[in-house]
Image (cartoon, rainbow, N blue to C red):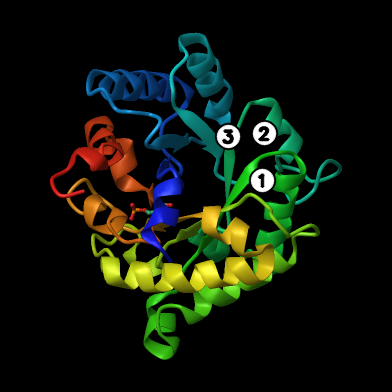
Amino acid sequence: MAVTQKAQRIPLIAGNWKLNLDHLQSIAFVQKLAWTLQDARLDFRKVEVAVFPPFTDLRSVQSLIAADHFPIVFGAQDISEHDSGAYTGEVSGAFLKALDCSYVLVGHSERRTYHHETNEQVGAKAAAAIRHGVVPIICVGETAEDLEARGASAVPVEQLTVALEQLPDGAGADVVVAYEPVWAIGSGQAATPEQAESVAIQLRAVLADALGPEAADRTRILYGGSVKSGNIASFLREPNVDGALVGGASLVVDEFAKIARFQSHVGV
Ligand code: 13P
């Protein structure tokens, strides 16, 4: 994939808070993050910064960002594949859109593991997001056992292929893909940038087959798994890696702000 195409994709630095920070803590966090990035004169035309708080924080984060015109966007960590009905505990795409969510994570490995989400369900959730004008971030990644048995790309390619098959009007759809090797999540052991790039190339080929070459070229593919300020630049140097999905390091304002400022790191 040519470097000029990468230049047209605005990098996305996304912080997945998981089950951390309540709505009051979310206000303090987003305020400090916005001030830190503004003080550092981050050029928000060159990088998009997003946070993914728990559902109960979304309204607070929305109100704060709107009131103070912070150039930060946000999304939810999950979405129901259903639009309404007797689905206790679920949150619909319409509700997320009404709160101005730009994005929603679907198929995070923790949901696949603890809630047994299948590739079909992940695709149905992505379809629900698209139906309501929320961009799904489709998460894929191999376990250590998958890596050993089938190499790095086989499982992520399969997960993305099946998920995209569930989009009724796949062609041209607006999605983001996050490649997160399960063994790299929270382990302190990130994949190498070369592995991230090699899997990203194959995921982009899947996108081209399912959505068409133009959509594939403009789709951002993120890397996630033990991303820190010290390694972010090495991932973003790869031609097919267009951002990061950050877990633990997204909960520390100064560290997350440094990750968002990867373009100012030496050599990028
Ligand atoms: P860590 O950055 O803590 O490894 O988590 C990655 C992740 O799961 C983001 O969704």
Label 1 sits on residue: 79
Label 2 sits on residue: 96
Q: Is residue 192 shown above or below 57? A: below
Camera-side residue of 202 and 110:
202
Residue under the image location 75 percent in, 64 percent down = 166
Of all residues, the one furthest to the top in this rendering is 67
- Badge 1 marks a residue whose secondary structure is loop
Would you say 91 lies left or right of 11 here? right
Numbered badge on residue 55 = 3
Q: In 3D space, how far apart are the residues under numbered discs 1 and 2 (Cα atoms)?
A: 8 Å
Residue under the image location 60 percent in, 67 percent down = 208
First in residue order: circle 1 vs circle 3:
3
Q: Amino acid at mark 1?
A: Ile
How far across and down, in percent of the image, does residue 93 sit?
72, 40
Would you say 33 lies left or right of 182 here? left
Residue under the image location 69 percent in, 55 percent down = 172
- Badge 2 marks a residue whose secondary structure is helix
Camera-side residue of 34 and 208:
208
Would you say 170 lies left or right of 208 here? right
Q: Amino acid at mark 3?
A: Phe
Q: In 3D space, how far apart are the residues under numbered discs 1 and 3 (Cα atoms)?
A: 10 Å
Estimate how packed mark 1 is, as few (under 14), some (14 to 19) or many (20 or more) residues with alpha carbons within 10 Å. many
- Badge 3 marks a residue whose secondary structure is helix
Q: Nearer the viewer, mark 1 or mark 3?
A: 1
Q: Amino acid at mark 2?
A: Leu
How far across and down, in percent of the image, does residue 199 sit?
42, 72
Marks 1/2 in contact by CB < 8 Å: the verdict is yes
